Amino acid sequence: MMPLLRLDGVSRVYRTGGGMFGRGSLVRAVDRVSLDVAPGQTLGIVGESGCGKSTTGRLALGLEAPDEGSVRFRDAPLPAPGTAPWRAMRRDMQLVFQDPLGALDRRLTIAAQIAEPLDIHGIGGKSERQDRVAALLRDVGLRPDQAAQHPHELSGGQRQRAVLARALATDPALLVCDEPISALDVSIQAQVVNMLADIQAARGVALVFISHDLKVVRQVSHDVAVMYLGRVVERGDPDIVFATPAHPYTQALISAVPVPGHRQRARIVLQGEPPNPANRPTGCAFHPRCPQAMPRCAAEDPAVTTLPDGRAVACHLAETPSRIAA
Amino acid sequence: MSAVITTAAPVIRRRAIPPAVMVAMGWIGFILAIALLAELLRPYGITQMDLKARLRPPVLFGGVWAHPLGTDELGRDVLSRLMVSIRMSVTIAFGATIIAAVLGTTLGFIAAHFRGWVEQVVLMLVDFQASMPFLIIALAVLAFFGNSLPLFIGLMGLYGWERYARMSRGLAAAANSQGYAAAIRQLGARPGRIYLRHILPNIAATLIVAATLSFPEVVLLESGLSFLGLGVQPPMTSLGNMVGYGREYLTRAPWILLTPSVIIVTTTLSVSLVGDWLRDRLDPTLS
């Protein structure tokens, strides 16, 4: 099946610290990432803060142009950000933000904001738009009377629902959710996640779900990518990845997830902080913190290996499968 | 008969206007009315002299009803001159404030939108304007180009634009990088829509407060320049011009100076009060 969205070896390089006189240093926020999203499916992206998850999401949406590689949507390259074709394309791909209050215009009513994309893209007449807004409110579980309220009058979960309704207004084919639930409290998180699943089932929208919450990602994703320092280190079916992680970093991440009823588990505690992406370690970027590092890891960048179960892993251990610690 | 349950629509509660703001609005309205109707209301011409009735005090201080606010050193009617002065000063102050706000906000938005060298150029202009005493710029321009009312208003319009530019640039850049403006942009909106429909209303409260602060300053600047003889030239008159020329008679005929001063103080105070109230009123998160 043709993927809806395909990222092919995309990199995004930022220059930091360079003023008028200094050259600054280059930061590869995203480094040769290849991913694809099938229509109606969910791709989960996990990783710790600063690993390039959000930048990958922005590249996937074409909000930023990649410095290397290509992003193709429906088998066509994305237009440059800010151009008219790019603007027209926003109908088909939308972003859901982490901070719903920041993403809403606090001076406009919820109804006006949900109608905004219809207005921008000139969809429907006046009464048609009103009907559509009412239907969207219903779909995301907001009451009709909340249409006339302002964002500050809603709770955090309701605001995120409003943001979602706005993102769904143009009936997009792809929705990138950048940490959509991390600003919400736990009881609301579950509601929003379930609602996303319902919406996906009803509308067949493809999701890119960016989160650091492994359990939620496992629950919603059809495919998961684990990122470390701008690269995808492991990718595959979430049940397999989370049950038998192949990459030492994934193993460490998964061992950190608390499991109810198990007080003590073998916990892999990583040493040190994630390295500065401007000063990337040689070889495998994970080797200074890797409990299974070999001399080879410091010298050679591991290639992506496909395991028999279909997973892609970037680790020297995976190249000789017998040595993977299960 | 069955009970009818009505789902009450959210009642839009009109917040009462505080009395001080009512008075201030009334005063501004009164001043604007005088400014508009000065030519009809004034009892005498502003240059009409009555040398036999020089330095007459106002009516409650031993004057006569023929000159309710007294006369000046040439026997000109202070009330008539005051009305025309209000007209002149209000024209200059409103014109200049509007020019400065529009110019500054536009430049600030341009800087925030294009970034890069455009932003650097705007910021350089801002720094230049902020580091140069405006009085010196004004003196230089007026000395070279002479004085005419449109030029003078335009020049006053250059006063304080850098504040609007700084504020609008900062607020727009913040909104662009994260928040509602970024969200609207990724919905596919054109820049014009983002800036005019979303960012401008959101930062209008701040800009209005800045305008209410700079309005009195423009009045004072105009007064200062007129006082130095570079602003409004006789035979035309303005509030500052009246204060400037009335200064010489401060001890003998204080009303010449005090009446325009009172107008300056009350009007600027009213504008500030109304501006402060408007800021709260325009912000839906404050109830």
Image (cartoon, rainbow, N blue to C red):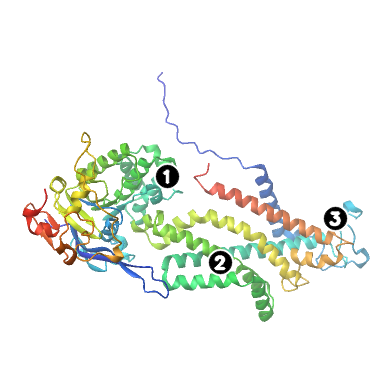
Which chain hosts label 3?
B
* Quadrant in the picture for the N terminus of chain B: top left
**Residue identifier under label 2:** B162
Which residue reaches farthest right?
B52
Q: Residues within 10 Å of mark 3 (few under 14, many from 20)?
A: some
Q: Quadrant of residue A133?
A: top left
Residue wearing tag 3: B68
Residue furthest front as drawn: A295
Do labels 3 and 2 touch, CB within 8 Å? Answer: no
Q: Nearer the viewer, mark 1 or mark 2?
A: 2
Q: Residues within 10 Å of mark 2 (few under 14, many from 20)?
A: many
Residue A315 or residue A273, whichever sits in front: A273
The answer to whether residue B71 is above or below residue B120 is above
Q: How many marks?
A: 3
Compared across the picture, whether B68 is left or right of A185 comes to right
Is residue A40 visible to us here?
A: no
Identify the residue position indicated by label 1 in the image: A151
Q: Secondary structure at mark 1?
A: helix
Q: Chain of mark 1?
A: A
Amino acid type at circle 2 is: Glu
Kind of element beneath mark 3: loop
Q: Are marks 1 and 2 in contact (CB under 8 Å)?
A: no
What residue is rendered at 66% in x and 62% in y? B217
